[in-house]
Amino acid sequence: MNWILIALLGYVLLQLAVVFLLARKPQTESDYLLAGRSLGPWLAVFSVFATWFGAETCIGATAEAYSGGLTAVAADPFGYALGIVAMGLFFAAALRKRGLLTLADVFRNRWGSGIERLAALVMIPSSLLWAAAQVRAFGQVIASVSDLSFIAATGLAAFVVIVYTAVGGMWADAWTDLVQGLVLILGLLLLLAVFVLLGGFEALPDTAAAAAARAPARARPLIEVLAVPIFGTIAAQELTSRVLAMRDAKLARSATVAAGFLYLAVGLIPVVIGLGAAATLGTGVEPEQVLSRYAQSQLPVILYVVFLGALVSAILSTLSGALLVAGSLAAHNLIAPLAGDRLGERAKLRLNRAAVVAFGVIAYLISLGSDSLYALVEQASGLASAGVLVLMVVAIFAPAVGGVASAAAALIASVAVYVLASNLDATMPYLASLAAAVCAYAVLAPFGPRAGRLSRT
């Protein structure tokens, strides 16, 4: 019998059991999407940390460090950690003070329902791409410890997470994030301890220098590499939803900043493993397999199972958050407003759960059509976030500037320029997208109706 697979599935089933135990907790849409805005310090910090610390951090950062040295990991963990801290310092308290359910609600209160729906439409694909990356990673983990094909393993992974997210919502997600975050930290610390005991730090200067020497020439300048994770993180609905779920504005600021520093501290472990793995594995390993192959070759079976649990924890928490966000944007900001006041809380809950299921299936299909986990994550961070960031900054810090036309132009220009620049292999597609959004907003700011003002209720 495949005891590793059995142990892995047992861990997943345990998470599902926790979700079903908490399934009756959500009674309203706010309960389901934001855990009733009741997250305390522990749940708040670990909800942000576990949601952001996904497969791309464990697998991707190790791969980039292994194949390109320290300069290759500027985006993750450094860029994403900076983005989380910046969100906490400058945006978290201001967002939490307002009675919102999603980031698109900010735009509805400031510019009206048209901009709300447009923003939701441009943000949903980003969450779907991020979810697809996690589904792909989860499927690879299952396939690596079983005889299942990649398609079957990915299908099983998608089914588990769809059920996991649709049933429990944010409340169950926050509690499982706490468990998964602790398991994740434990698993990576175990791997780091083995790395140290085997003399990994002694060889680290040589292996890191060799990795840097064989690194391919950087296709994009450092400012572009950092801009995507920093600004993309600030403008991400996944992070905003965690901020809005916290108990008060003060906690939203402090817990988000703390989560950013925790992300950086834990995120450095895969980087260290990636920099030093060549001393054990050689230089011919597929980069995205370095972390799992190093763990499998160096850990006893029982510790390897703990490591796999940590990896699955990172994937589950990130994936469930992305699906919940995509579902909330579609159900709360696109579909529910069409029904006016006719929808009760139970109907809204069913609508949000149905949206999670639908987007889970779509994420699964996207994952099958992609060849790269890293490419999916990069597209998720860059697509549309520039325009969303511009609207966030204006709505919070300069609410009297600009109107509906400028808001629409900023969103449309950011997406159009990013897609065009990416297809043309431009060196700075994200910064071009950000510049286009700023210019579009500024040029049309004097024109058009101003709609509402940002609510402070």
Image (cartoon, grey):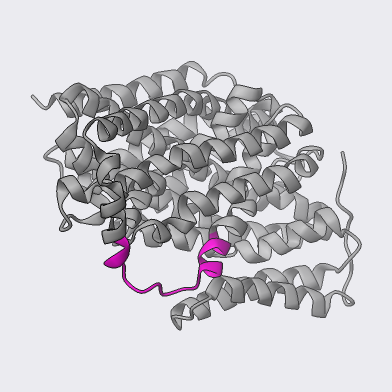
The residue located at (31%, 39%) in the rendering is: 157
Residue closer to the observer: 387 or 197? 197
The image position of residue 447, as x and y in percent, is 88, 77
Q: Which residues are magenta?
A: 211-228
Quadrant position of residue 386: bottom right
The image position of residue 91, as x and y in percent, is 74, 47
With 9 as the anchor, is 266 left or right in this view? right
The image position of residue 187, as x and y in percent, is 34, 29
- Asked whether 354 falls inside the magenta stretch, the response is no
Residue closer to the observer: 382 or 160? 382
With 144 as the anchor, is 457 left or right in this view? right
Query: Looking at the image, is 359 positioned above or below residue 40?
Result: below
Residue closer to the observer: 317 or 339? 317
Look at the image and tell me whether residue 26 can be seen: no
- Residue at the far left: name it: 1
With 423 as the anchor, is 253 left or right in this view? right
Which quarter shows the N terminus? top left
- Asked whether 221 falls inside the magenta stretch, the response is yes
The image position of residue 4, as x and y in percent, is 17, 27
- Residue at the far bottom: name it: 424
The residue located at (53%, 41%) in the rendering is: 324
Look at the image and tell me whether residue 96 can be seen: yes
With 314 as the anchor, is 444 left or right in this view? right
Counting every numbered tag in the picture gives 0
The residue located at (64%, 52%) in the rendering is: 234
Query: Looking at the image, is 448 positioned above or below residue 82?
Result: below
Residue closer to the observer: 4 or 228? 228
